[in-house]
Image (cartoon, helix red, strand yellow):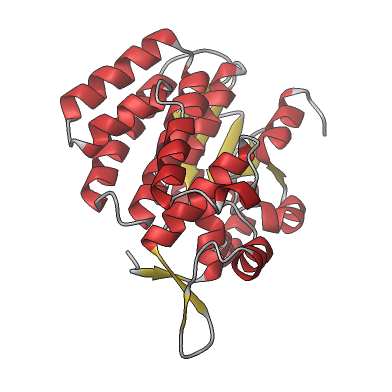
Amino acid sequence: MPSTYEIHEVAELTGLQAARLRVWERRYAVVRPVRQANGYRAYSAEQVELLRAFARLIAAGERIGDLVNEPVESVVARAQGRDPAASPHAVLLDAVKAFDRDRLETLVAQQLALRSLADFAEAVAMPLARDIGELWALGRLPAAAEHLATEVVVHALKGGLRGGSGPLMLCACLPGERHEWGVLTALARVRERGWRVVYLGSDLPAAELAEAAWSMRPAVVGVSSADPLLVQSQLTHLGGLPVKLPPGTRAVAGGAGMEPHARLLRTYGYRVGLDGLREIAEGNP
């Protein structure tokens, strides 16, 4: 992970726009990033953590003009106090930090017993994924802990998709796509809407997905990616997939990586996103 962060990275980690960060620096001197030889600002991990604390407290109704006069330690501590410590994903995060797989598996099973799969995915799994990503980016969580969390949570999400009734949706991620939390959350919502979901995993070529469709004859085949550049590199293969599917099988493209290419994908014969799937379910041409 980096030892310093440029302003666009800080904006992503804190949710604060770069323009606001510049104004705060000029007006309040909230942090003093080092200027690199190329003139770019370089923020330390401690400065990013403070800015995240400011952002969280301001979202809760406080004002930056008041916060800058408060000791840094107090700001960070109060911001951490704003985090819902009793939130379901907070205790899971503690287990991840401790590398306690048994406890993590127990907690996940408890949450799944209390919630629907879709609610678990949206209220527990995705917030946990965001926290893990932020902590890793700040150098406060090792990659091994992230791998442990992924192994346990993704396994639970995949298991929750099994069974069910209704029309069949066959789904996979594009070759090179290895981020499964998002697609599995979307598929949990699909299953809750009455579909039977078979997920073939990450990193599957379009030709292999088409071959599986001829064996299983699903109502819908879905492809997913969170990376627009990866989607762009696969557009030729994506373009050929809908015409290779069995008669009556429709194609849906989902994930944040598909959205920038939505217009082109529709010309290929795809419906895009959950709205596209809903249109198919409602029988819209």
Residue for point 35% across, 23% down: 159
Quick one: quadrant of the C terminus? top right
Farthest-out residue, front: 69
Q: Is residue 231 above or below residue 181?
A: below
Instruction: Identify the residue at horizontal 60%, vertical 38% (top origin).
Output: 246
Residue at 50% across, 25% down? 123
Q: Nearer the viewer, residue 182 or 212?
A: 182
Q: Residue at x 32, y 64 (%)?
A: 1
**Residue 283 can be seen, yes or no:** yes
Which is nearer the eye, 29 or 178? 29
Q: Is residue 160 above or below residue 83?
A: above
Please count the marks in the image.
0
- Decide if residue 108 is on the left or right side of residue 41: left
192 in relation to 272, above or below? above
Query: Residue lying farthest bottom?
Result: 37
Where does residue 209 sit, x and y in percent of width and height?
47, 45
Residue found farthest to the top:
114
Picture coordinates of residue 144, whole percent (x, y): 21, 48
Q: Quadrant of residue 80?
A: top left
Q: Classify residue 115 as left or right of residue 106.
A: right
| Residue 278 x, y percent position in the rendering | 72, 28
Percent of width and height locating residue 275: 72, 34
* Whether residue 230 can be seen here: no
